[in-house]
Every structure is written in C-alpha cells, then in structure tokens.
Amino acid sequence: MLKGSSTQLLDLTAEQVSSWLQSFDTVLSDCDGTIWHDDIAIEGAAEVLNTLQNRLNKKVYLITNNGLKTRRELFDRAQRLGFQLPNEHHIISPTSTIVDYLQGNGRFDTKKHKVYVVGNAAIARELKAHNIDSFRAGEREELAPTDKWQDFALREFTKEEATVNVGAVVVGWDEHFSYCKMARACHILCSNKNAAFLVTNKDAVHKYPNFHIPGTAAFVSGIEACAEINALEMGKPNPFVLEPYIKNGDLIPERTLMIGDCLKIDVGFAHNCNMRSLLVGTGSYQLDTLAKHQNLVQPEVYLPKLADLLRYL
Ligand SMILES: [Mg+2]
C-alpha cells in the first residue's frame, strides 16, 4: 500500500490485509475520536487494540494531545474503559512529554527552578509527581475593576519572585486565560532568554456538534507574539514527542502504525515521523470528504471505524 493513497481497507482481500498487518510491529493510537469520546469508549476499539497487543504481539501505545489529565489519570481511564496496557509508559501525553523535556533540558534545574503554568491543574499535578515546582496552574488572574495595567505590572512584576528561578513557561488549554496571564508570561520570557517556553499542543479549535471553541493555539499565539519567540509543541504532530521512545529502542518509526481520526494532527504526525498511517472515520474526516482536504497529508489506509479491523484479526 502506498503512502498517502487513502486505501479503503475494507476493499482489500484478506491476504492483502494480512500482509499489511505484518508490515508493522508497534501501534500508536490517538484517543479522542479514535478509541473514545471523552469518558465513553468507541464500540469495539478496546477489543481491536487488545487483540493486536495480546494475540498479534504488537506493542500498543495510546497517544493524545489532551493536556487536561496527567499520564496516570489517562492510564486509569484507559483501564476503566477496557484497554489492557501493560503500564503508564504506554500512554504518551503532553504532560508527560513536558516532564521528559524539563528533566532532559540542561538549562532547567529541577531542584532549583519552577514553572509558570498558564493552563489547568493537571499540568501542575504531573510536574509535582516528578518533584518539579510550579505556580498559578488552574488559577484566575485578572485586572481588578479599580486597577490599571500599570498598577498591576508595578505591583506584580517588580517583586523578585516574579522571575527569579522561573525556568519555564508552560501553556495549556485555559478557560481563565486573561491579559494578566499573557503579561506575566511575556515578562518572564522577555526577562530570561534561557526560560523554556512549552505548549501542550497547538490545536486551533475544538468543534462540538453545537458550538466551536478556541483551542490552545489561540492562547499561545498571543504569548508568542509578545514574547517574540515560538513555543515548543509537546504534542502531535511534533516528532519531538517520540524522540525518547525512539532513543530507548521502544519503537522503529517505519515499523509503526499511527491510528487517528484527524488528518492534520494524526496523519500529519505519522508523516512527520515517517510512520505508517490509518485514518478512522469516527471523527471529523470520512473517506468521501478526504478529496476536499488535498492540501493535507492523506493517510495510507482508511477504515470507517477501528472496530472494522476486528474481522481480520
Ligand atoms: Mg482525535
């Protein structure tokens, strides 16, 4: 099967699917829209991944851009929904990638430095579980009605603790995003050029059946503009996410299948990492609409839903 050919797997013979199944030995599966919708498993997805792992001896990892839960919390959800992963290491999430990055970054001293978090409390919980201090995660920070921006800046940014020993700014999805948070991140990053600037993902928009809301990319773009540097993306489609796994010999990209429901993020990630790709139609993209997205990398194979693979296993 050719890369980018969007081959409908259901049109292939059993022999062709069998030889395709033998062409990879590791499986990375996206979560939302591919194997579950929030806390509800997509029917048959667990059976497919468990069979690939337990009967066909594939290594199976779940990979998500969800920065609203720690790796442990995602592992607990996976177990609760019937996915039989051997351990937490088989979950690849932005919060765990952030920890890996900070622990491996020579300029960030985990004993001395702390992290300013624009985002939710899960980021702080993951950092704390690895003995990294952070502040302000999940908190509100807004101008008081009587404050002018000068009052806020003079009061907050002239304190030594505003920047001393702050070794990183981490941005995640934040329903309390504000001018004050942007200003604090700007002040830290402009005052200390060695501070790391990380973002859980650059998902632009979250589309729900009845409404659309801004994704993390919308928040981080504002901070990138004023800090005049780009944030490092700790989620798909940045190939950096897989580096520790490749270095440890956990996977070989050419022998790895990436399964997902999003062309830009999942199929794009497979392309960036030189992995194989399978697009499932349980998210925003279906086979008959792929032609409208010729500007994006196309998958190698397509299935309406992951459970459709079961008949070949
Ligand atoms: Mg998805």
Image (tube, helix red, strand yellow):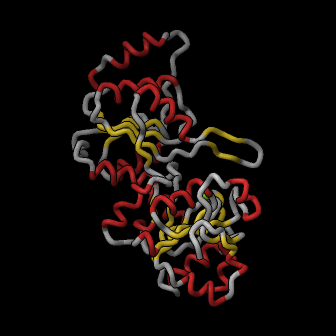
**In terms of depth relative to the viewer, which is nearer, 70 or 28?**
28
Q: Is residue 245 left or right of residue 40?
A: left
**In terms of depth relative to the viewer, which is nearer, 294 or 87?**
294
Measured as percent of width and height from the top left, residue 15 is found at 63, 90
Q: Is residue 106 above or below residue 19?
A: above
Measured as percent of width and height from the top left, residue 267 is found at 57, 61
Q: Is residue 35 visible?
A: no
Instruction: Give the residue drawn at x 68%, y 71%.
Output: 303
Measured as percent of width and height from the top left, residue 250 is found at 37, 72
Q: Is residue 23 visible?
A: yes
Quarter, ligand 1: bottom right
Instruction: Give the residue drawn at x 43%, y 57%.
Output: 239
Q: Is residue 29 above or below residue 193?
A: below
**In terms of depth relative to the viewer, which is nearer, 172 or 273?**
273
Counting every numbered tag in the picture gives 0
Instruction: Give the residue drawn at x 43%, y 10%.
Output: 150
Instruction: Give the residue drawn at x 73%, y 65%.
Output: 287
